[in-house]
Structure formats: C-alpha cells, structure tokens
Image (tube, grey):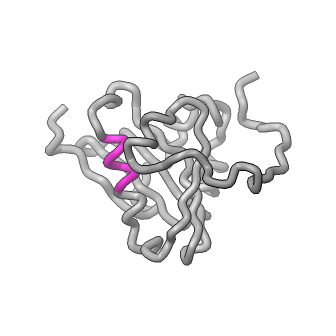
Amino acid sequence: MNIADITFKYGAGNADLAQVTALLQDSYWVPRISRDDAEKMWANSAAVVSVYDGETQIGCCRAISDTVRFAYVMDVFIAEAYRGRGIGQSMVKFLLAAPELATVYHWTLLTRDAHKFYEKIGFGLFSRPGDFYEIRTENPYAAQ
C-alpha cells in the first residue's frame, strides 16, 4: 500500500454501499446488517466519510447530528489489512472537519474496545456520566 493512493471523500454519494455493507458485516456491532439498511443509515447521516485505496473502499465512518451543536460518531471501520497505519485516525479527523458540521461543539461516540484510538484523536470519557441515559432494545443485527 502506498499512502499516496489513500483518499478521503465526503458524502454518502461517494460511498461504495456494497463495500460499506461488507465492512460493517465484519464489525462486532452489526455483523448481520443488510445492504438496504446500510443504504438507509448512510442516506440519513449528517456527514459520511469514505476512504479509498485507489478505487477500492477500505474504510468508512459517519455522524448523525443536528448540524448545529451535537454530533454522534458511528460506524468507524477500516479493513483489517489497513489497520495500524494511522488511516483510521485520519479518517475520523476528516469527519470532525466536515464542513456541514463546522459549528458542532459536542461530539460523542460509544466504543467497546477502541478507547486508546479515540483518546489519540482527543475524545475522553463522558464528562457527566450520571446525566447520560438510554433506552436499549435488542440489536437485530448482532451475531447470534
């Protein structure tokens, strides 16, 4: 891999949805995601980043947001063969700089296993964990 061949692109229209679906199916959080649902997720995101090595999509991430003050980073994924080279961190930084999210000042995300990765980008533990609430139902895309 030549780092010069790596490109970052904004916009759902720049995503190879077949490859996005395949990447997400390699994740622990939505291994059973369908292409239709991946397309809906990407279309309904405030910002989307796709990473390419030449013509092949090797990574993706997205944010849902009110586009004014809050954004939630989701579905950060780099193909295994490309991990450990700084591409993922560059991709998330590219997302944080998305023009459509320029006024956002509160970024959040959830991670089970990538704490150090996100800390290198500037994320930290939730500042007010006692204020954070959720309703959680069964994940229909989880591995069985």
Please state the horizontal and vertical placement of residue 119, each as a whole percent of the image: 44, 42
Residue 56, quarter of the rendered image: top left
State the quadrant of the N terminus.
Answer: top left
Does the image show residue 45?
no
Residue at 70 percent of width and 49 percent of height: 129
- Residue at figure coordinates x 55%, y 29% from the top left: 113
* Viewer-closest of 28 and 96: 96
Q: In this view, does 1 lie to the left or right of 108?
A: left
Does the magenta segment cover residue 91? yes
Residue 144 in the image: above or below residue 112: above
Q: Is residue 13 above or below residue 22?
A: below
Residue at 56% x, 73% y: name it.
Answer: 69
* Quadrant in the picture for residue 143: top right
**Looking at this rendering, what residue extends furthest in the top direction?**
144
User: Residue 48: x and y, percent?
Assistant: 47, 59
Please state if 22 lies on the left or on the right of 122 as rendered. Answer: right
On screen, residue 64 above or below 21: below
For the point 74% across and 53% down, which residue is it? 132
Answer left or right for 128 relative to 13.
right
Frontmost residue, 60 versus 121: 121
- Which of the pair 109/82 is nearer the observer? 109
Does the image show residue 66? yes
Return the residue nearer the eye: 142 or 70: 70
Left or right? Give the position of 109 relative to 8: right
**Residue 89: where, in percent of width, then height?**
35, 44
- Where does residue 45 sit, x and y in percent of width and height? 57, 62
**49 relative to 29, above or below:** below
As for residue 25 lying within the magenta part, the answer is no
Residue 139, quarter of the rendered image: top right
Quadrant for the C terminus, please. Answer: top right
Residue segment shown in magenta: 87-93
